[in-house]
Amino acid sequence: MTHSVCKRCGAGFWESEKGAREEDLCDECEGKPASTRAARRSVEVFDIPSGLGGSHTVEIVRELQGGMVRLRVWYGRATATGWEPWKDWDGYRFDADRAELKKKRTMPLFK
């Protein structure tokens, strides 16, 4: 398996195909036309407890049933050329209850 970073959304993902290297898009972005998402200059984010004593900055990726949402962690910094991801957590996706989200705001992706 090879670890790659999606060129569109910045999410980390694992490629199971033998010989796969530096693939362009994650499963969520694969097969979808490039929209305004590729040219985003900011993102709507929330804070959610990390379970490690702090919080994660997250974006809602998809609405799920029963008040649940799929979230994408934004971990890095905005630069003059765009988002610089920090590999530890940036792009990690998980499901959580929408009620856990706090501090809604707009975060710039460019400095």
Image (cartoon, rainbow, N blue to C red):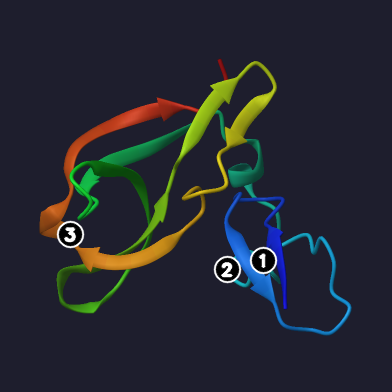
- Front-most of 87 and 12? 87
The outermost residue toward the right is: 19
In the rendered structure, the answer to whether residue 11 lies left or right of residue 42 reads: right
Q: Residue at x 89, y 78 (%)?
A: 19
Determine the secondary structure under disc 1: loop
The residue that appears at 65% across and 36% down in the rendered structure is 39
Q: Are marks 1 and 3 in contact (CB under 8 Å)?
A: no
Q: Tell me the quarter of the picture where residue 64 sits.
A: bottom left
In the image, what residue type sits under mark 1? Lys
**Which quadrant of the view contains residue 54?**
top left
Q: Which residue is mark 3?
A: 98
Task: Evaluate if marks 1 and 2 touch, with contact meaning CB atoms under 8 Å apart.
Answer: yes
Does residue 101 appear to the left or right of 56 in the view shown? left
In this rendering, the answer to whether 73 lies above or below 62 is: above
Q: Is residue 77 toward the left or the right of residue 73 in the image?
A: right
Residue 12 position in % (x across, y down): 60, 59
Q: Position of residue 21 (x, y in %)?
A: 85, 66
Mark 2 highlights which residue? 28
User: Secondary structure under badge 2?
Assistant: loop
Q: Amino acid at mark 3?
A: Arg
Q: Residue at x 61, y 49 (%)?
A: 10
Q: Give residue 32's mark.
A: 1
Give the number of the mark in front: 1 or 2.
Answer: 2
Which element type, helix, strand or loop, lies under badge 3? helix
Q: Cα distance, mark 1 to mark 3?
A: 26 Å
Q: Position of residue 100 (x, y in %)?
A: 13, 54
Mark 3–mark 2 Cα distance, whole angstroms, equals: 20 Å
Q: Nearer the viewer, mark 1 or mark 3?
A: 3
Residue in the image at 61% along x and 20% along y: 79
Q: Quadrant for the N terminus, please.
A: bottom right
- Sequence-first tag of 1 and 3: 1
Gap between marks 1 and 2 measured at Cα: 8 Å
